[in-house]
Amino acid sequence: MNLFNHVLLQFARMHPRSGAPAPDGWHYDPQVGAWTSLSTGKFMVHDPTASGYGTKKNDLETGEDAKGQ
Amino acid sequence: MTSVVDKAVHRPKALLLSARTDYACDHVVAALRQSGIPYLRLNSEDLENSQVALTPSEPRLRVCTAGSEFLVEPDSLTGILFRRPVYLRESAAAGSGAERLARAQWGVFVRSLMVFEEIRWVNHPARVYLAEHKAIQLLAARQVGFRVPETTITNSPRYLPSGPGQLAIKGLDAILYAEGEHEFFGYTQLVERSTLAAENLAALPTVVQTAVVPKLDLRVTVVGNEMWCAEIHGRTGSIAGDWRELKDAVTYRPREMPEELRQRVLALMGRLGLVYAAIDLAEQGGEIYFLEVNPTGEWAWLERQLGFPVSQALCRQLSGDRS
């Protein structure tokens, strides 16, 4: 049979294969181990203007156990 | 710390095994810094640009990264946050064969840190591996007294769960695969029994459950003995299928948990050997049904939207302060 006719795959949602997006305007500081502002050093996840990150709405669906893959 | 190698050797109490775009881990970093707890975050993307050496028999891990040197050993280490997959899904893997080989080898390196066997893992990779299996989850949930929807894992309509009503179908593992420039993700679907009976399921084992509809979705986030519950509401009330498909349109409300439910959740955590989990439940007619447990599930959006203090709780687990 054609695997793609399987009911599980018929309903699968398509996304661009771009991986997780790098947050615009923030940089990953390897010495801190977090995404921060270049100008203020503030944590991205503490900035309400960067509200898309750390939210379920912006979570790319890869299965919750596939992170870091 | 500076851009040249710092002369001091840092001895972290908390080791965070993650990825750069795991933004929830940033919340944990912030909490650790606020508490003055020394830590090291090792991301999968950064390993090949770091110098690492694991001495299994001690055990001891030395890391030189971002201009600093770290010595990870049981005398100072109190907790390990493990936010990594326990196996690679080739169906969505990117890169050449050599690149996939490198990722697999680094994955084994990270899991080899299980030599720190006396350390608090959140969660231990072996426990994550076990708990990722829906069949194991459902058995454990039933054993601790949860109601679970009648479930069959099958590749044939011959063996569908009995009884009336719709059926819920989902993959035995994440339905995640890549084709060309696109990636595909499959959500739980509700189907009519007659529709599924006419399908050819032979190619894939499929989880088929009696559908819990109508229902109120509940998301329980657990860290050690602490837990927080959120109700998930759609625009027009309850959500028939998979709430993740509607995530731009759902709202969350905090919900008190009765003591009996809390104890049942703790019993499930104990049976699966988990310290952290995100558990999906469904309420119907005053009864609570277990749907699934995510041992590395997301939580940061609930901390931001509902104020659940998950990062602080994780920080306490990692630092040895579990009072």
Image: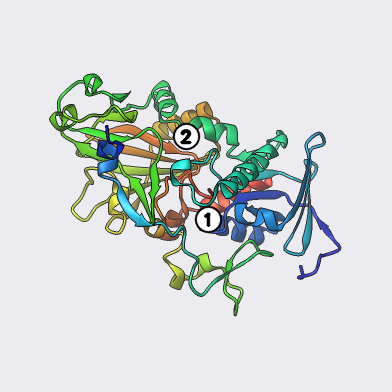
Same subunit: marks 2 and 1: yes
Determine if residue B320 is in view.
Answer: no
Residue occupying the far right of the picture: B7
Identify the residue shown where x is 16% and y is 28%: B198
* Mark 2 belongs to chain: B
Position in image of residue B35 (x %, y %):
66, 58
Closer-to-camera residue (B138/B224): B138
Judge from the rendering whether residue B166 lies leftward or rightward of residue B187; answer left or right.
Answer: left
Tell me: residue B164, above or below residue B2.
Answer: above
Q: Tell me the amino acid under the disc marked 1.
A: Asp
Disc sitting over residue B132 in the figure: 2
Question: Mark 1 belongs to which subunit?
Answer: B
The location of residue A32, given as percent across then percent down, is: 66, 64
Left or right: B117 in relation to B107: right
- Whether the residues at callouts 2 and 1 have beta carbons within 8 Å, the answer is no
Q: Residues within 10 Å of mark 1 (few under 14, many from 20)?
A: many
Residue corresponding to mark 1 = B22
Q: Kindly report the distance in space between the C-alpha atoms of the residues bearing marks 2 and 1.
A: 19 Å
- Dot 1 lies on which element? loop
Q: Kindly identify the residue that appears in the image at 49 percent across and 70 percent down.
A: A47
Report which quarter residue B65 is drawn in. Answer: bottom right
Residue B25 horizontal/vertical position (percent): 56, 55
Number of the label disc, if any, that sits on residue B267: none
